[in-house]
Image (cartoon, rainbow, N blue to C red):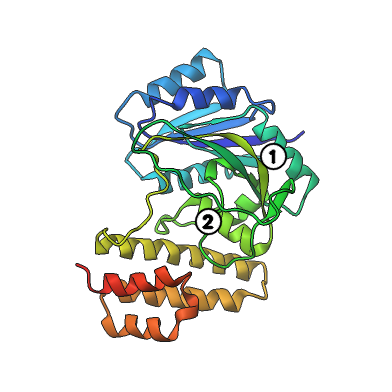
Amino acid sequence: MVKTAVLMATYNGEKFVKEQLESIKNQELKPDYVFIRDDQSTDSTVEIVKSFIEENSLSNWIIEKNKKNLGWRLNFRALLFDVLNYEVDYVFFSDQDDTWYLDKNRKQVDIMENNKEIDVLSADIDIIKISEEATVPNQYKFKDDSQKISQYPNNINYVNYRQGWTFCIRKSFLDQITPKWTEDRILSHDNLFAGISGFLGTGYNLNEAVGVHKRHGGNASGNLLNLKQPYSRHVSELLIVLSYYQILYDVAQERNSDKSGLVKNYLNFYLQRYNNAKDRRFSGTIRQLLFSRKYYVDFSNWARDIVFLFKK
């Protein structure tokens, strides 16, 4: 019998969280475990969740409030470590402000069960805007999206193709990746699993909507770096990407990948790029801009180093 777990991060989500809890509880494929971590909410989120669990006698649902605010990235990391010692086959991420269609988990598990080569299966979404200031994120378009599933592009970059709450992850894959995510490596859980599975050829997308993503202006994801932001944000973003390559290199070596050398080159590049930015090394940055162009994701990423070199 297939066993599943849901990992849900919450923070000041009193307006939306109950609707999402309902959509998890009412799944056609009921989760065997639901782990919820609240990141020091100042509203009634925790009380709403606890009442929901009690009212519905959900003994397999666990909520824990962090002792301090971790931020959404490390909150999801904590959830991944929560599930490590549980014997389940598949793990789902959940945000607090989306709503799953009731056949979501069943559909994704059916595909994973019939395609053992898949480690990560994301899915399409429907999007609604519920506030004037809300933005709508661009969705990556797969070339073969007329098919039921599409394989992620073979890519070495720190990338993602769909929102993390659409992910179904094979637990054996999660078990390999999670211990390598040390607390000093602050990065996004969805990019981590999408990027590594794409690199390994084990990441796929279900080309059907599995839920509704509500855009309300306060979403934790989608706050991309732009040139108006401070220099410190530029440095912190480089540290995130560096952390990704550190983990990817560990995985590539563990799997004896013939591309380990390539990953090491990217790791060395981003280590140097991060140190150049952190220490404001003008000559080092210029050398990378001139002689290491191939390691930049695109032109805008390359140009960013020039702009931030002169910012305070």
Residue 63 shows in the view? yes
Q: Which of 157 and 88 is in front in this view?
A: 157
Q: Nearer the viewer, residue 159 or 58?
A: 159
Q: In this picture, is 222 found above or below 130?
A: below
Q: In this picture, is 136 found above or below 271?
A: above
Q: In this picture, is 126 found above or below 266?
A: above
Residue 16 in the figure: left or right of residue 312: right
In the rendered image, which quarter is residue 71 located in?
top left
Furthest residue toward right: 114
Kindly identify the amino acid type of the residue bearing the numbered disc 1: Gln
Furthest residue toward top: 55
Of the numbered discs 1 and 2, the one sitting upstream in the chain is 1
Report x, y in % for residue 12.
35, 31
Residue 92, numbered circle:
none
| Disc 2 secondary structure class | helix
Residue 108, numbered circle:
1
- Characterize the local packing of mark 2: few (<14), some (14-19) or many (20 or more) Cα atoms within 10 angstroms: many
Report which residue position mark 2 lands on: 192
In the rendered image, which quarter is residue 136 located in?
top left
Query: For the image shown, how many numbered marks are present on the structure?
Result: 2
Q: In which quarter of the image is the C terminus?
A: bottom left
Report x, y in % for residue 55.
51, 13
Residue 278 shows in the view? no
Residue at 74%, 48% (x, y): give it: 147
Q: Quadrant of the N terminus?
A: top right
Q: Nearer the viewer, residue 184 or 22?
A: 22
Disc number lying in front (1 or 2): 1
Residue at 57%, 25% (x, y): give it: 23
Report x, y in % for residue 301.
41, 69
Kindly identify the amino acid type of the residue bearing the numbered disc 2: Leu
| Disc 1 secondary structure class | helix
Residue at 48%, 18% (x, y): give it: 52
